[in-house]
Amino acid sequence: MSTATVARPRVLAGRAARARDLAESLIGDSGDRWRHTAGVAARAAELADRLDLDPDVLVSAAWLHDIGYAARIALTGFHPLDGAVHVSAEGWTARIAGLVAYHSGARFVGAARGFAAGLAAFPDERTLMSDALTYADQTVGPKGDRVDQASRYAEVLLRHGPCSWNAKVDPMRGPHLRSVAARVEHALVGGPAAGLPLAG
Ligand SMILES: [Fe+2]
């Protein structure tokens, strides 16, 4: 499905509404990136509902996960870290900052680029909550359209090219993202989350 309009989550209250406002102030004029962000937030709201996760946390983190791309808050040029630093400076919880810092296998690119110490300032919770954020990001395309994880990953590798950091860490990040997708999809069909390891 191709989505030209900006999707909105069903539930948008409290912190999630504030997260949306902050994200809009930073990347609301970024076109496709904003459409992607809104799509991820909508996907996160669905996942929170179906997986019984706190929507206040998951949807807020979804709105904030890509704010580090905003030029005016860029510190390192590594968007998960720059986003987490800004989220933290704006008074958001360490948990939400950590979800932003480590979304979508950021630890692999972060380590390769020399930002492991910067990321270590934030908690890496490695739970179904962090899996759900990554899964939401990895099942919404660059224009906000719904895609499957394998297609999304292949598109990113193609778009960024064989010399990109994403390509360099593919041997670690690729299996990690596939493991995340497997865990979330297992949980979505009612399987016990404990039945799959969270180490990937
Ligand atoms: Fe994203």
Image (cartoon, helix red, strand yellow):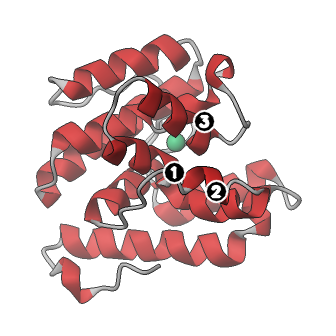
Left or right: where does residue 179 sit relative to residue 51? right
- Please provide percent x and percent y for residue 110: 67, 57
Q: Using the image, determine if residue 30 lies above or below residue 138.
A: above
- Please provide percent x and percent y for residue 187: 21, 72
Instruction: Measure the C-alpha gap from mark 3 to mark 2.
Output: 13 Å
Q: Quadrant of the N terminus?
A: top left
Q: Amino acid type of disc 2?
A: Ala
Q: Label 3 belongs to which residue?
A: 82
Between 65 and 82, the residue placed more toward the observer is 82
Q: Which mark is residue 121?
A: 1
Q: Which mark is residue 191?
A: none
User: Tag 1: Cα neighbours inside 10 Å, few (<14), some, or many (≥20)?
Assistant: some
The answer to whether the residue bearing label 2 lies less than 8 angstroms from the nearest atom of ligand 1 is no
Instruction: Write down the quadrant of residue 78 in the picture.
Output: top right
Q: Amino acid type of disc 1?
A: Ala
Do the residues bearing badges 3 and 2 touch, measured as CB atoms within 8 Å? no
- Please provide percent x and percent y for residue 106: 58, 56
Which callout, 3 or 2, points to the residue nearer the camera? 2
Between 103 and 186, the residue placed more toward the observer is 103
Q: Label 2 belongs to which residue?
A: 117
Between 97 and 12, the residue placed more toward the observer is 97
Q: Residue at x 73, y 36 (%)?
A: 77
- Please provide percent x and percent y for residue 7: 34, 27
Q: Using the image, determine if residue 126 lies above or below residue 199.
A: above
Instruction: Write down the quadrant of residue 44 in the picture.
Output: top left
**Is residue 189 among what the camera can see?**
yes
Instruction: Measure the C-alpha gap from mark 2 to mark 1.
Output: 7 Å
Counting every numbered tag in the picture gives 3
Identify the secondary structure beneath mark 1: loop
Q: Amino acid type of disc 3?
A: Asp
